[in-house]
Amino acid sequence: MTIEVTAGEPRLDALCVLAGQVRELMDAVALTDVGEEELTAVTGELSALTGRLRAAARTTPQPFEVAPDGTLRHLGNAVTGAANPHALPLAVERAPGGGVRAELVFRPLHEGPPGAVHGGISAMILDHLLGQAVAAAGLAGMTGTLTVRYRAPVPYGTPLVATAEHTRSEGRKSWADGRIALPDGTPLAEATGLFVTPAGWLQRGPAGQ
Ligand SMILES: CCCCCCCCCCCCCC(=O)SCCNC(=O)CCNC(=O)[C@H](O)C(C)(C)COP(=O)(O)OP(=O)(O)OC[C@H]1O[C@@H](n2cnc3c(N)ncnc32)[C@H](O)[C@@H]1OP(=O)(O)O
């Protein structure tokens, strides 16, 4: 899988490349059929590598921050963060007709029911996308409620499209709708959510800037 690295800073770029390699490692672990001896040998090598990375460690991932070019970025985010091995990472863009969209391919690693993506993984993606639709409308907030309707099993290993749009706001409360669909638009999982802008964000913004 090709990981887009956009930090533009050598150390952060290297961290994002490392995270991409770890994603490949996680996929390999989920699918490997090598024998016990090889599993034990690989575990030993990984233990040594883990120790090298922990030689200099922080207590929180790469923060939500203002990048040198003035844009907001969150390389440590669990859904979009290129520096977070847990993230797909999801590349979210503005949708031509309003709202936001992202193309995505889930992996066998995301399996819940046999042959399909775990419902909690789908909900996580929808939570983030709805939140970003609200943020794109200028009203960034924390998820208050999220309701998901699972209409059909979400497959992994096949291209899908996720979209979301802000639907309305009342004071600090904003609502958004979204869905994960097949490329032809057939919805597989649909969500609606309420996002509340914490009072402090109105003064300082989500990055505390
Ligand atoms: C430019 C910026 C870019 C940013 C990009 C970011 C994109 C990232 C996208 C990431 C996306 C992923 C995001 C994540 O993963 S966010 C992670 C998951 N969510 C959380 O952890 C949220 C935890 N909860 C809280 O922090 C607080 O409870 C919040 C902030 C939600 C409200 O605490 P606050 O003290 O501020 O609220 P208030 O008590 O003054 O109430 C205010 C109003 O809101 C109503 N209310 C409150 N809670 C709920 C509820 N649960 N259901 C229904 N309604 C609720 C309440 O009745 C009242 O309404 P009204 O009586 O006035 O009518």
Image (cartoon, rainbow, N blue to C red):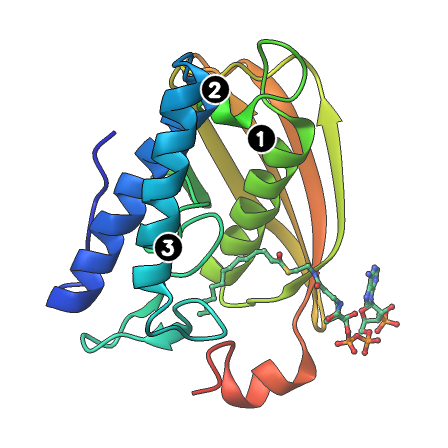
List x then y, in percent, for residue 27. 39, 27
Q: Residue at x 39, y 73 (%)?
A: 57
List x then y, in percent, for residue 147. 77, 39
How busy is the neighbourhood of tag 3: few (under 14 within 10 Å), some, or many (20 plus)?
few
Q: Amino acid at mark 1?
A: Arg
Task: Identify the image quadrant of residue 107.
Answer: top left
Image quadrant where one finds the N terminus: top left
- What mark, if any, has residue 60 been given in the picture? none
- What mark, if any, has residue 108 been given in the picture? 2
Q: Residue at x 24, y 58 (%)?
A: 15
Between discs 1 and 3, the one toward the N terminus:
3
Q: Nearer the viewer, mark 1 or mark 3?
A: 3
Q: What residue did someone put label 1 on?
A: 179
Locate residue 115 relative to residue 33 in the image: left or right: right
Which type of secondary structure does the marked residue at label 3 adopt?
helix
Between discs 3 and 2, the one toward the N terminus:
3
Q: Residue at x 68, y 15 (%)?
A: 113
Between discs 2 and 1, the one toward the N terminus:
2
Residue 105 visible somewhere in the drawing: no
Q: Are marks 1 and 3 in contact (CB under 8 Å)?
A: no
Q: Amino acid at mark 2?
A: Pro
